[in-house]
Structures are given as structure tokens and as C-alpha cells.
Amino acid sequence: MSETKITLPESAIPAGWYNIAADMPNRPQPVLHPGTGEPVGPDDLAPLFPLDLILQEVSEEAEVAIPDAVRDVYRLWRPTPLYRAHRLERELGTRSRIFYKYEGVSPAGSHKPNTAVAQAYYVNEAGRTRISTETGAGQWGSALALAAQLFGLECKVYMVKVSYEQKPYRRSMMETWGASVVASPSQDTNSGRAILESSPDSPGSLGIAISEAVEDAAQREDTAYSLGSVLNHVLLHQTVIGQEALAQLEVAGAFPDLVAGCVGGGSNFAGLAFPFLREKIAGRELEVLACEPAACPTLTRGPFAYDFGDTGQLTPLVPMHTLGHDFVPPGIHAGGLRYHGVAPLISQLVLDGLVRAEAYGQKDVFASAVRFARAEGIIPAPEAAHAVHGVVEAAARADAEGRERTILFNLSGHGHFDLGAYDAYLRGDLEDFALPEDEIERALKAIEPLPKPAGVSS
């Protein structure tokens, strides 16, 4: 296959989202009500989410139809291109074939609109007029601001403070699309004020920002809460990525033996990997690699446990790999990966040995990102650069073993708003953060009184 770019017509946009829950060998354990310890039901979620999203969250159907109004918006950028990385292959001197699915062509510059558009559609259909959310690096906030504008909704975004300061143009992007953006922890909520009282210089975290956004939505009948990762319905919406990639690789006459993506909460990883994991579950030979930061090593160093999804303990208890809900990651530039937990679906797939994880230092990640940018021309977002580094490492291992691999990864967004991070790397000012074991142990003490998942000892 000599072509570099593989595209599909608009008619190839999937008609349905793929639900991996229908095919998993072991379903995730139930989400629990923190007060009763019983599984959460639709009535518990109704104050925050529209009914259609609640039904998707618990669905066991293999396919969920995509509404026509959502597919119409998808046509602004979907199908996204698949590239054969010929130049990167030559730069690496590898015998492996490397492909990447590029989600940076969306208006927001990442994969996030795939679910933002769907969530805004369902919120509008439910008759609510306002939506609240959190954002780490600003990619999710940007996507939801865009989607809210397209469906006539107000949008309030709680942006993790360290990213609010590192990435001011993400905030400008959100405000251009009509959103109201505040640095989290903020003075706008009880959760934010409590954090600021105890830690006035807190850099914030996704867990803190989630607490603020959930509190905001719970106090207003006109407001729905929207999450950009972790939950089943969010990962469901992202599977348009992998479905398109399967069709594009068929055009190329190829199928990967390694699929990789970066993981924070897990949405872009799931979007690419889940349709391929269906093939793996059915017996096809395939390695699936989750790439995470060493500064927030949730899958590689966090136990599988029940934990709150937020710092303020306002959410239900979620079964997932976690570093503890009050863990505050260092201020690495991959803000979208600075989350203490990982999606229950992905956590269960890791437990079942269908997915494995690796963690990388920030300097190594940026070295691979620059190498990729100079070869392929696209500057990766710091989050997506973790997948780039994972692929560079995997290709090198394959060459050392005398193997030729076919590798696919998700380049989930561009880094045009992250050039401050690249500037720090190129100046030699970028730091690696060593995460001491005693910090993980401290954070995990907070979850010791919580219920334990089945099969996990106390």
C-alpha cells in the first residue's frame, strides 16, 4: 500500500455507535450509590443526565442508532482521515507499518466533539437549556462549547486552574463559542470554595472540577451535567473513530496487530480500540496498548477499587483503576490525562487481560512528539503524544526482535494551543515528575472505607 492518506465518503459515517458491553467476557461491576451502597438506578441519575443518555449508560445492545441530527453535524469533519506514516517509518528506520487516525480535523481540534455533539443533542431534546462541565486541557470544554452553540444551549465550564493558566487560548476558544469559563477550584461553588479555603494555591484537578460542575447542575433544573470521558455513553459515542478506521484499513488491505491510544479517562482510546477489541474478543490476534503519563499512572500503579469520580464525593462510586479521589497530579502539560481514575469499561478490559498499559515520562513523550511533527508535519497534542511515544517504542522493540508489525494509533488532537509546552521542551525547561509511592499510598487511604469490588480483598 503506497497511499499516504485514506479517506471515506460522507456516506461512510457509521449509522450506529458500537457498544462493547454486548461482547465483553465480563461486564463491569455496578456503579453504587454512596449512601446506600446499592446499584445506582435511572432515578439517581435523572437530575444530571437526560433519560436517553441514562439508557445508553446501561445498554447491553451491540449497536445504538446515531440520530440524524447528530450525523448531520458529524459531516462537518467526519469521516476523519487515516494516514500511513511513511515519513515516520523512514525516520525511525523501522520495518513496521504505522497508521494513524487523525481526529484533529474537527472544529475543536480533537476527538471530543464526537460525544459533545451527541450529549448536547440529547440535552436539547430533553428540554433543558443549560449544560455544565469540567475540562482539563480545554479540549473537552472547547468541544462542548461548540456543541452547545450548535444546539442553542448555555454552557458553563470549570477549567482546571493549571491548564487555565497554561492554555489561555483554549479559554478564548470556548468563550468565542459562547461558553462561560472559570478556573477551578473557583468561588462559584461550595466545592470550589472549600478547596480554596484549605489550599488557596491549589492547581486544581479534574476531580475538583467535576465536583464543581456536578454541584452546578444538581442545583438547577434547567441544567444538565456533561462529562467528556469515563462514562459508558461517552465511550460509546467515540466508537465512530474505530469503525471508520476498520473500513479505511480494509481499503488499504491491512489489519493491525497493535492498536494504541493515550489514556486519561479513556474516551479517545476507547473510540479507536473498542471496535478492534470486538475482533480480539472474537479470536483475532491483536495487542491493545493504553499509554498514560508516569506522573498520573492510574492503570499501571493504581488498584482496581470503588472510588468517587470527583474530589468532593458528589458522584456515585465507580469500579475502576484509581489513584484516589483526592489525588492531585503534578502540573504536566498533558492536562487531559491528569485524572485519578479510568473508565470502568477499560478498567475491566485491563483486568481481563485484553488491554495492557505502559506509563511514560513527559520528556520522552515530547521527544517523540517532536520527532513525529518533523516527519509527518502534524504537531500532536501532549495527550496524543503519549500514543506517539508508545508507538515509537513498540516499533523499536519489534525491530530488535526482527519482527514486522502493523501498528495503528489514534492521533486524537493537534497541539496548536499547546505550543507553550513545546517551547518549554525545546528550551530544555520541561520537567519530569517522579511520583513517589508514599503520595499514592496517602491518596489511597481515602478509599479504604469504601465498598470493595467483587473479587478484591479488603
Image: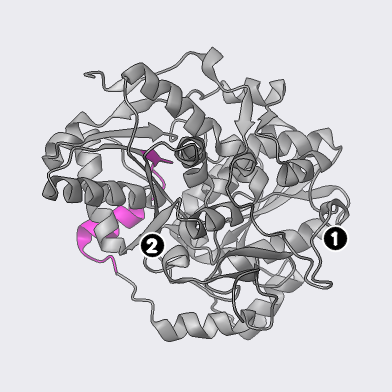
Give percent across and percent down for residue 237.
61, 37
Residue at 30 percent across and 51 percent down: it is: 390
Residue at 43 percent across and 67 percent down: it is: 297
First to last magenta residue range: 409-431
Q: Is residue 59 left or right of residue 416?
A: right
Residue at 32 percent across and 28 percent down: it is: 83
User: What amino acid does circle 2 point to?
Assistant: Pro
Q: Is residue 423 left or right of residue 162?
A: left
Q: Earlier in the sequence, mark 2 or mark 1?
A: 1
Measured along the vertical axis of the image, is residue 183 above or below residue 115? below
Measured along the vertical axis of the image, is residue 187 above or below residue 122? below
Dot 2 corresponds to which residue?
293
Secondary structure type for disc 1: loop
Secondary structure type for disc 2: strand
Q: In front here: 194 or 345? A: 345
Label 2 to label 1, Cα distance in Å?
35 Å
Residue 345 is labelled as none
Q: In front here: 328 or 291? A: 291
Dot 1 corresponds to which residue?
219
Q: In front here: 409 or 79? A: 409
Residue depth check, mark 2 versus mark 1: number of the one nearer the observer = 2
Whether residue 392 appears in this view of the structure is yes
Quarter residue 5 falls in? top left
Give percent across and percent down for residue 233.
67, 44
Q: In front here: 12 or 159? A: 12
Measured along the vertical axis of the image, is residue 261 above or below residue 34? above
- Look at the image and say whether residue 424 sits in the magenta stretch: yes
Give percent across and percent down for residue 347.
54, 58
Give percent across and percent down for residue 22.
64, 40
User: What amino acid does circle 1 point to?
Assistant: Gln
Whether residue 265 appears in this view of the structure is no
